[in-house]
Amino acid sequence: MKKILAVFGIFLVLALMSCQTQKPAVQAKPAQPEPSSIAPARKGFAPASTDQGAMILKLAFGSRDAVASWSVSISGSAGPVKSYSGTAANLPAETFWDGKSDSAADAPEGTYTASLSVSYGDKFVPSTATSAAFILDRTPPVVKLTVSPEGFNPTVEGVSGPVAIAIDSRSALAGISAWTIEVLEPDSANSGTPFRSFDGTKSQDRVSWDGSSTDGRIVVPSSRYPVVATVKDEFGNVGTARIEIPVAGIAALRVPEATRTTVLPPEKTTVQETGVKPAAESADVARTVTEKPKTPPTVSLLLTPALFSPSGEAANDTVNIAVRASAPAAGISSWNVQVTDPEGRLFNSFSGPGGVANIAWDGKDTKGELVESASDYTVTATAKDEFGNVGTSTAVLKIDILTDRIGDRYRLRVSSIVFKPFTADFTDVPADRAARNKETLAMVAASLKKFPDYRITVVGHAVMVYWNDPVLGKAEQNGVLLPLSRSRAEAIRKALADLGIEMDAMTPDGVGASDQVVPDSDYANRWKNRRVEFYLDRK
């Protein structure tokens, strides 16, 4: 028995020693996840810009299958201003910041960074990534225009010249991207109509202007020509400056002495005013004074019909442009008609001799492109008399809602509804634009009421900013343009319902930049892509 107890005691001592020396188990820490990242798509942005009004932030989630939640925080010199968050159910490839704080106030301009924080629960330790710095710029470029000499003086050949127009533009936070200088028609009837234009990219530049227009006309004496410079910085802010270039009156014209004769009395033996020695001391000397007429031609312009509805198919589907010009003391040597599109660019032109013109126009430009539906085109008629005096007249040609047939369905296309940038709001825009939007929607509603037995699909379209970058372009299409064009289509649907179109007969849709009328690289015409189309299918 004693032996048994002794053996048991030995085993008990060994067991106790084992308990005292064995190390407790240590729970393993979660591993590090794959890296996450956040990056701005460009150097900066300007909330007031129509094409760079928001900063795109590219997001990449490491170990995305294990993500539990995430958050983005945007911070400036004063600390965080904006935050976003989500769960594993929504892991976006990008997010957008419009320059507003969490309280919907405008964030101050300056330098910002964005951070992406990712939580993985108990699978991985949390991770944080910080972006490169980017700029929020709210200040438009400062623009200064000067001209030397200060204006033109009439001469027998035309006008003295040229004048040098200098542009000086600066921005505190951004580089200068491009500028345009437009010389406008001088009289109120043609206010805002381009007479001559120049463009460039340098922040400081100079152009030489000889007083001629795009179509070869010369500035008119006793006039003042407005000059407007528009400068865009690299983030899309726009600054402007305006001056006027005067043209002296015809009284300043110096006619050569050879064209002046007057009869001097026989007893006069010297010639006054000219300094020319007479042929004989006792002979009569003659000098003739011939003055050019100062009154410009009177020009009348009549458009018939005033509301133009070309389909591009009917032979008589034209608008008649009638021009009549006359001058009290001179013959009319030539006339010119220019049609400019809603953006102020030359769309088509016509010219001929004399002072009478009747033009039957089919609504197409020189390339065969038809006018845009529900838009205003400016028609300017100019006549020049035999002394070079110029008269003008301007009228607005309103284009009706254009309907074309595509197979068994009809389509109405409208590019003239203007929205507030990056929103579906077409009322919070400048007053003249808002009034035009209201007028256009009334025209659309009137056209749609002609098709009571049809279902209507309202399709929104948009312009792509990153057309030259496949990766950013795809992100812009999916993250911005598709939802934006859909929400704009829905806004138009509701507005048309208020104008009497049955809500259930309309279906909103948006395709972003997937169905463009012109390439988005065509900066002069890509405004046509920013449109709403209405497809009509029989019920």
Image (tube, grey):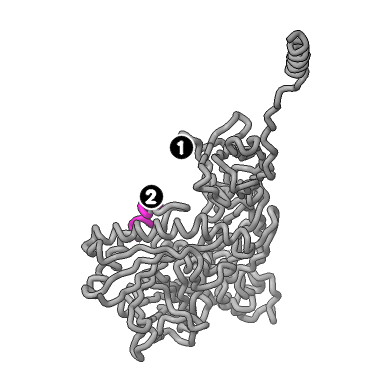
Is there any visible trace of residue 220 in the rendered image? no
> Tag on residue 238?
none
Q: Nearer the viewer, residue 62 or 129?
A: 62
Q: Does the magenta stretch include residue 432?
A: yes
Question: Which residue corresponds to the image point at 76% horizontal and 21% vertical from the top-left?
Answer: 22
- Disc 2 secondary structure class: loop
Q: Looking at the picture, does residue 283 appear above or below residue 500?
A: below
Question: Which residue corresponds to the image point at 47% horizontal and 76% vertical from the top-left?
Answer: 338
Q: Looking at the picture, does residue 482 appear above or below residue 360?
A: above
Is there any visible trace of residue 225 in the rendered image? yes
Q: Splitting the image into 4 quarters, where does residue 414 fall?
A: bottom left
Residue occupied by mark 2: 428
| Quarter of the image that includes the N terminus | top right
Q: Is residue 52 magenta?
A: no
Q: Nearer the viewer, residue 433 or 71?
A: 71
Tell which residue pokes out farthest to the front in this image. 1
Q: Splitting the image into 4 quarters, where does residue 230 fall?
A: bottom right
For badge 1, the amino acid type reads Ala
Image spot of residue 250 (x, y percent): 53, 67
| Quarter of the image that includes the C terminus | bottom left
For badge 2, the amino acid type reads Asp
N-terminal-most mark, 2 or 1: 1
Image spot of residue 142 (x, y percent): 61, 46
Q: How crowded is mark 2: few (under 14 residues within 10 Å), some or many (20 or more)?
A: few
- Disc 1 secondary structure class: loop
Image spot of residue 497 (x, y percent): 25, 60
Q: What stretch is highlighted in magenta?
A: 426-436
Question: Which residue corresponds to the image point at 59% horizontal and 71% vertical from the top-left?
Answer: 212
Q: Nearer the viewer, residue 71 or 413?
A: 71
Q: Looking at the picture, does residue 53 appear above or below residue 477?
A: above
Residue occupied by mark 1: 104
In front: label 2 or label 1: 1
